[in-house]
Each structure stands twice: as structure tokens, then as C-alpha cells.
């Protein structure tokens, strides 16, 4: 290019720059017509739940629980009825241990009703079974994760069939009460821990009622506490009255799940075993013993269905409060706390009655309440992500954000470890549950990653931090719950768990749990700092 042309270009650029400066600095009229956008979503809310009953008469294992395979929350209850009759050697007929009960008529069987203070002691007509059969409520194994099950293949929400495995018999497919007839509707032999991480089942054929697909084994929820009577529930602190556990109305025998069962979740066990006693084994002759499982599921707006009068029993006086608490997610639906957009100081908030997922605004920042960690400690997270942070520099953004918090908030923040032992796991090393839940099924194979859960550490420093993958799995039950609801689907937020030397795990695209490079950042997402506060 000749010097003359260079000069001409330079003059032209200077002229354009001068024009731009004039436009920026001057006064001018401006109009922008018809800047328009559409953000929409078509979603069909489909409720669907299935009672699972796994039974093996040889080992006396008996697992009873409820699966929500739909995409909306459910409320669940189960009632157990027992029947037993015996016949001495040489006698022509069996005699039931409860008068008026008939083996072939399950509506005459005796409702299992425990004492007000002890689930293991039956009362009323049900007391006759204390001598012969011991029921084990709940599921607890020291040092073990929650058990695994095979999700139902039958996703017809108009079908009342149960998922019965082993020697369990679904009532719709087999009303036989001879102790030998098959009526199973679900794979498995009914023994304890039949399913485990990594198992799958191909239902092509179909082998069992339902869709001809392959399902991977999934995990039940870990029970927060052992099953209890509704009187014992009433004595709990208000902040503990909603959670993942079973509550039995000892007056009617109905056992209620004390939480809304979210989409993709499966309750812990109501019943874990039904074992005959030595007295039954020593009967001089023969006996028949059976348990009938009656399960009912409703959407949370229909709690009056559970409050309808029972023809034979009276609901406990606290049942209405219990169902309302489950419906609202809290014993008092966060009453006494400000609304999500009311900007208040920390001393105006009562964290102990907050339900997980509650949104609140404190000292100019909007947060989401995640969990009560006990001892007055509560885990909260910033509701929106701080944009432009990358995986490798998110701590810098977290520290800057924390340094600008109101001093009254900082005064509540509890110390966490100065350095987290995160471990590392890549996408190709993990196996996964289905897309709606999206949880790794073999995370225990990477103990450093699985054990990196954020708790108070008195040797550490009060500070903000990013959640770990283990935190996410513990706190958020499925993909949908991990979204930032008011933001577009493309917004992501990062965890602190690395997938490789330069990559990190993050929540992206409306909840997809993905392994993305740390160069993905920009304006679409970033870090979502969390705090443990004490009140």
C-alpha cells in the first residue's frame, strides 16, 4: 500500500472516530421500535407413582416403599393388614388368630396398628400378631448408603398394579392366598439387597408389565430418621417435622411419607422385614401368615382425600397439621419469615422454620435456603450466578462477593475448610441414573469426590465457597431442582469438583449435569457462592 493510500485510510478512520465521539457525547433523539422476544415452554404435568413390594418367604425379607416416576410431586400413604391362621396336627380346619377374619377376604384382615409410643408393639386386635411375627420398620445399615431398586416399567398412571417382586403377589394379577401361587409383576427374587449400583434390566418382550425398555437400578432416599408414630412426630421440633421418613397414625394404621415425594424420587423403606418368631416355628401343625399392602398416592392439592372419614377408625387429631405441613413443605409454611423479595436484615429471619428451596432476600442479596445442618447451622446459596467466573478462578469471585457482604451477614457465617479435598473424576469414569434425576451411580468408587461434603470446620475460615458434586447430589434430588428458575436455560453454575486438570463439573442448560471445559464462561453463567450461617 502506498504512503498516500495509508494517509487516506488514517484520515478516514479519524473522521469515523470523531463522528462516534460526537454521537456519544452530544444530545440526540433516539427511538428503538419493536425490540421483541419470546421465552416459552410447553410442559405436560404427568403424575405417576408405584408401590413396590419385594418379598422372599425363604429369607423373610419384605421391602415396601413408593416410587414417583412422574414429573410432579406426590404425597403417599401405605397401610398394612395381617392375617394368620393355624391348624394343629390332625385338625380338619384352620382357626384364625383374630376372630372374624377370613383368609380369602383381605378386607377382613387385621389392620396393623402400633402402640402410640412403640411401632414394634401392636395394639387392639393387631396385638394377636405380636406373638408370631416381628415387623422391621425403616432401613438402616451402619456405614452403608441407601438401598437400590429397579424402577417400575409400568408407567401407566391409571393402572393400580403394584411392582411386586419375588414371592410378593400383586392383588390385581393374583388374588390367591395359598402361599405358593405366583403373582409377581416386577423383576427380582425379593431378597435383601438384590439390586445394586450398576445393575440394569432389559424388559424387552416384555418380560414384566410395562414398557419394553432397559432401566438402570436407582437408589431409594436415605431416611432422615426411623419411622415413628404421629404422637412422636408431634413432639419433634417444628424444623424437623417435614423430611424423608415415615409417620404412622397409630389410630388408623396409615403410614404417611413426611415429605412431598418429588419427581424421580423413591421413599426409604416403610418395612424392611417380616420375620416369624420361635412361637410360630413351634406351632404343632401348620400355619398361614400373610401381609396385605394398601398404597394410596395423591397430588399435594388433594390432602382432603387423606382426611376423609375412615369407616372403622378415627384419624389422629394431629393428622391435619401433619398433612398441611407436608403440603406446604414446613409446619408453618415459613410463616413469620419475610417474602422472597422483602429485603430484610438477618435478625428478621428465622432459619429454623425455613423449608429447603425457600427464596429470601437478606441485606441486598437474594438467597435460596438449602438445608438445616444441625447445631444451629444452615446452608444457603446465592440465588443467581455471578457471571464471567471460570472454573479456575471462581474462588476469586466468591471471595470478592463475600468481602462486599453486609457486616451483619458476615457475622453469621461459619468457618469451612481453608482448602477442600475435592478429588477428581472425569465424565467417562461415571455411570448415571436416568436423565430426569441425573446422578452418578458409582460415585462411591471415587471416595475423595464422594466424601467432599461441606460442613462447618472450626479450624477453617468463615468464607463463601462453591458447592461440591457430592453436595449437589445430597441436596438436589433431580435435574429440575438444580435450575435457577428465573433465568434462561442456558445459564450455568459451577461446582468446585474438577473433572480433569483444567475442567470442572457444573450445572448447565436448565439442569444438565455436564463435564465442560473451564473456558466456558462469559455472560451465560459463573459461580454461585454458598454460605453456612449460624443462628
Image (spheres, helix red, strand yellow):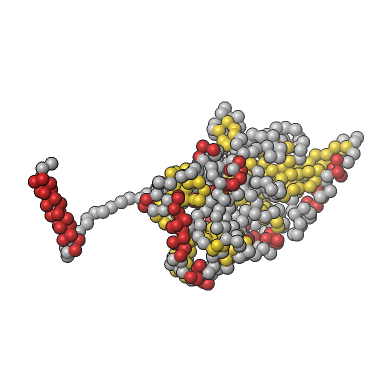
Residue plotted at (17% across, 64% down): 26
The quadrant of the rendering that contains the C terminus is bottom right
Residue 424: x and y, percent? 54, 44
Residue 306: x and y, percent? 61, 55
Above/below status of 17 relative to 147: below
> Residue 31 occupies which quadrant of the picture?
bottom left
Residue 244: x and y, percent? 62, 53
Instruction: Name the residue nearer the viewer: 321 or 24.
Output: 24
Above/below status of 504 relative to 237: above
The quadrant of the rendering that contains the N terminus is top left
Residue 416: x and y, percent? 56, 59
Task: Answer with left or right where residue 24 lies relative to residue 207.
Answer: left
Give the total of numbered labels.
0
Task: Answer with left or right where residue 229 lies relative to residue 409.
Answer: right
Task: Answer with left or right where residue 188 lies relative to residue 30.
Answer: right
Residue plotted at (69% across, 43% down): 63
Residue plotted at (52% across, 48% down): 497
Is residue 334 among the parts visible in the rendering?
Answer: no
Instruction: Name the residue nearer the viewer: 153 or 343.
Output: 343
> Residue 204 occupies which quadrant of the picture?
top right
Amino acid at each position: 500500500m502506498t504512503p498516500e493510500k495509508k494517509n487516506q485510510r488514517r484520515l478516514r478512520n479519524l473522521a469515523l472516530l470523531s463522528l462516534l465521539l460526537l454521537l456519544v457525547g452530544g444530545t440526540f433523539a433516539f427511538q428503538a421500535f419493536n425490540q421483541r422476544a419470546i421465552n416459552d415452554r410447553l410442559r405436560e404435568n404427568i403424575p405417576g407413582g408405584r408401590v413396590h413390594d419385594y418379598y422372599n418367604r425363604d429369607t423373610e425379607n419384605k421391602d415396601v416403599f413408593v416410587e414417583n416416576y412422574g414429573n410432579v410431586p406426590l404425597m403417599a400413604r401405605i397401610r398394612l393388614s395381617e392375617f394368620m391362621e393355624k391348624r394343629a396336627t390332625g385338625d380338619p380346619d384352620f382357626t384364625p388368630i383374630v376372630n372374624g377374619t377370613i383368609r380369602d377376604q383381605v378386607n377382613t384382615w387385621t389392620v396393623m396398628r402400633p402402640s402410640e409410643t412403640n411401632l414394634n408393639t401392636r395394639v387392639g386386635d393387631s396385638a394377636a400378631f405380636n406373638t408370631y411375627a416381628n415387623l422391621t420398620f425403616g432401613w438402616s445399615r451402619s456405614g452403608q448408603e441407601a438401598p437400590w431398586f429397579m424402577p417400575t416399567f409400568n408407567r401407566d398412571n391409571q393402572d393400580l398394579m403394584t411392582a411386586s417382586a419375588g414371592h410378593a403377589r400383586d392383588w390385581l394379577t393374583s388374588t390367591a392366598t395359598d402361599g405358593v401361587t405366583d403373582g409377581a409383576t416386577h423383576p427380582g427374587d425379593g431378597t435383601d439387597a438384590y439390586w445394586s449400583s450398576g445393575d440394569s434390566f432389559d424388559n424387552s418382550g416384555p418380560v414384566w408389565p410395562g414398557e419394553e425398555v432397559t432401566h438402570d437400578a436407582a437408589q431409594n432416599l436415605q431416611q432422615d430418621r426411623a419411622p415413628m408414630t404421629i404422637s412422636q412426630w408431634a413432639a419433634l421440633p417444628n424444623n424437623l417435622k417435614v423430611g424423608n421418613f415415615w409417620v404412622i397414625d397409630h389410630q388408623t394404621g396409615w403410614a404417611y411419607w413426611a415429605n412431598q415425594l418429588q419427581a424421580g424420587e423413591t421413599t426409604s423403606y416403610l418395612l424392611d422385614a417380616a420375620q416369624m418368631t420361635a412361637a410360630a416355628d413351634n406351632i404343632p401343625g401348620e400355619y398361614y401368615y400373610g401381609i396385605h399392602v394398601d398404597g394410596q398416592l395423591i397430588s399435594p392439592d388433594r390432602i382432603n382425600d387423606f382426611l376423609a372419614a375412615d369407616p372403622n377408625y378415627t384419624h389422629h387429631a394431629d393428622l391435619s397439621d401433619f398433612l398441611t405441613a407436608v403440603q406446604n413443605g414446613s409446619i408453618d409454611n415459613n410463616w413469620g419469615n419475610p417474602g422472597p423479595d422483602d429485603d430484610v436484615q438477618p435478625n428478621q429471619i428465622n432459619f429454623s422454620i425455613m423449608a429447603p428451596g425457600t427464596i429470601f432476600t437478606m441485606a441486598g442479596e437474594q438467597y435460596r435456603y438449602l438445608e438445616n445442618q444441625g447445631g444451629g447451622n444452615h446452608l444457603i446459596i446465592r440465588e443467581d450466578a455471578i457471571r464471567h467466573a471460570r472454573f479456575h478462578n471462581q474462588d476469586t469471585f466468591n471471595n470478592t462477593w463475600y468481602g462486599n457482604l453486609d457486616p451483619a451477614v458476615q457475622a453469621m457465617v461459619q468457618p469451612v475448610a481453608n482448602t477442600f479435598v475435592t478429588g477428581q473424576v472425569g465424565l467417562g469414569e461415571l455411570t448415571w441414573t436416568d436423565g430426569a434425576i441425573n446422578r452418578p451411580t458409582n460415585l462411591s468408587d471415587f471416595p475423595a469426590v464422594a466424601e467432599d461434603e461441606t460442613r462447618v470446620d472450626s479450624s477453617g475460615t468463615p468464607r463463601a465457597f462453591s458447592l461440591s458434586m457430592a453436595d449437589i447430589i445430597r441436596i438436589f434430588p433431580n435435574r429440575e431442582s438444580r435450575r435457577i428458575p428465573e433465568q434462561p436455560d442456558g445459564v450455568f453454575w459451577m461446582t468446585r469438583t474438577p473433572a480433569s486438570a483444567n475442567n470442572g463439573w457444573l450445572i448447565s442448560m436448565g439442569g444438565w449435569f455436564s463435564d465442560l471445559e473451564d473456558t466456558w464462561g462469559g455472560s451465560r453463567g459463573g459461580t454461585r457462592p454458598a454460605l453456612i450461617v449460624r443462628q
